[in-house]
Every structure is written in structure tokens, then in C-alpha cells.
Image (spheres, helix red, strand yellow):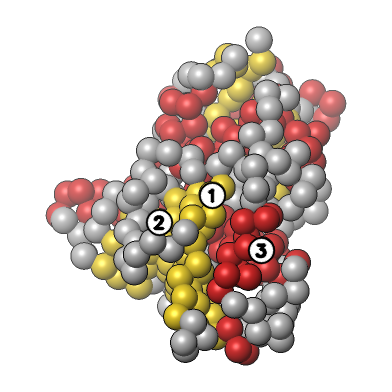
Amino acid sequence: MVSVFIDGEAGTTGLGIRDRLADLPVDVRSIDPERRKDSAARQALMREVDFLILCLPDEAAREAVALADALGDHAPRILDASSAHRTAPGWQYGFPEFLGGQAARIAAAPRVSNPGCYATGAIALLRPLVDAGLIPPDHPIPINAISGYSGGGRQMIEAHERTGGPAFELYALGLDHKHLPEIEFYGGLKRRTIFVPSVGHFAQGMLVSIPLHLDTLPLKPTSAEVRACLAAHYAGAARVMVKNAENTRIEPEALNGTDALELCVYANEETRQAVLVARLDNLGKGASGAAIQNLRLMLGLGAETKNA
């Protein structure tokens, strides 16, 4: 049986991955909690397993990769859930649906970097439209997003669950959120986007929205053409669904507990304005669910997407 070591399994993402691994034919190996920061003990366990999953802060993830590198031919294949290697050379980006053939590239890769939750929604909306020429790579793109507080780490979770926490807050107002590099790189953008994330007083769920003035786009597409482009790209994808805009409201928690990603195009044709919206569970397709999808590919258990 294939063996897996989750380095950082006690965190939110690590626990979610561990729960989901129960459905896969793998042997999960754990380190003694008292030795979880012991580099020698961790490296010894890395030598014994087939796969290493990193659920660590960025700097700790880089240190873990260095430990694995030192093992040479005995190094395990690595799936990194941090943001440390998302645009790094030698790493495959773990978003199987965003490009044709990406699932196959993930399946063959020795190292895969799991996408960020916000980035998953933004790239899913942008990349097909950029590739189709509907959005120029240098077009100014604003991105707004809201996440449940579970994506903010232990301190934020404790603050919300112990004291109630704020109802809503914007953050990263220095306009340098760590998901920006992957959004721009994998979204196919040549101009820096303005990304404004926020946190609501709910545990999990996420909305990522991108407003567009359709007449400022060179081809001046209709909202129906924008939606058709997204639908064509994701036709047959098991986890990504392009939905109809059936009402004028959308809430972030509807996909909680699932690994699905929904995309929708809201529009006012009279004013030639549109809002592209992605909805997902930030702990599902935005974190642990995406990791398991990538691990399934690396194990040869199926692509779950037409983009194999």
C-alpha cells in the first residue's frame, strides 16, 4: 500500500486531508507529536514514505522540501498545500481543470503545489476568457472576495469562535496578498490586478467576484458569450460547474462540505456590465478537497475532469 506522511497534519488543512484520506488506499504515517519539529525525525519518516504532503507555513514548507531534497533518490513525491512553491520552477500547479492536459501533468509530476483558495476562484474565471481573447492580458482587473474565517489560521478561528469576532472585515489593504502572484501568473494576466479580500463571521465558504465593463473589452462580448466560453472550457469537468444566474443574490456557504466549484455570470445587458462569480468551500476545492483531487491524480486513481 502507498504510504503518506502529512507534515503539519494538526492544522485545519492537514486535518481535512487526513479525514479525506480514509477513502483512499493509502497508509497514513504520523510522527510522534513531541517530535513534530525534530528535523531528523521528520526526514527519517520522509525517507520511508511514498508521498509527503506539506501543510505548513511557507518558510517551514521550504525547509521541509530541503530535508526531502537531501534524500536524493530516496525522496518522496511532494504535494505542498502552502503558497511557498506555487509559481516556483519544477513544480506543477495543482489545478487540474484550468488548462487542457493539466491533470495529466499533475499525475506525472514529482512535485505539485496546491492552489490558494482565492486563486482557485479567480483563475477559474479568468484563464478561459484570457485564452479565448475575451479579456486582454493587460486589461485592468479588480477582484473582490469573501471567505469564512476558517481560512485565516488558528488565531482567527479562535477569535471568532471564542469572542464572536467582527461581522465583516477587509484585509490585505496593502494590496499585496500572497495569492496575487499565482492569480496573475496562472490567470494569464500581464497587468497587476487589484485584489481586495475580506472575512465574514461564518466558518467556511467563499465567493470570488470580478466586475467587468463589457464595452471596455476589445471584442465587446455579451454576457451570454462570456458564459458560453466558461461553459465550453469546463464541459465535462466533475468538480467545476458553470451555473445560470437564476437570481440577483448569492451567498457563500451553499457548497460547504463539498469539493465543488460553481461559476456564474451576472449581468445587466442594458448597462453592458457583468460580474463573474466563483463560489466554493475554502476548505474543500479551496484546500483539502483540492489536495485529495491532486493526490488521486498522482496515485493514478482518475482525473475526475475532461482536461486529462
Q: Report the Cα–Cα distance between label 1 and label 2.
A: 15 Å
Q: Is there a contact, CB below 8 Å, between mark 1 and mark 2?
A: no
Tag count:
3
- Camera-nearest label, 2 or 3: 3
Mark 3 residue type: Cys
Identify the residue at horizontal 29%, vertical 49% (top origin): 203
Question: Residue 46's spot in the image, x, y percent?
Answer: 66, 25
State whether residue 177 appears in this view. Answer: yes
Identify the residue at horizontal 49%, vertical 55% (top origin): 243
Rendered-image quadrant of the C terminus:
top right
Mark 2 residue type: Met
Q: Earlier in the sequence, mark 1 or mark 2?
A: 2
Identify the residue at horizontal 71%, vertical 83% (top origin): 219
Q: Identify the residue under disc 3.
A: 229
Q: Identify the residue under disc 1.
A: 241
Q: Identify the residue under disc 2.
A: 206
Identify the residue at horizontal 59%, vertical 14% (top origin): 25
Q: Earlier in the sequence, mark 2 or mark 3?
A: 2
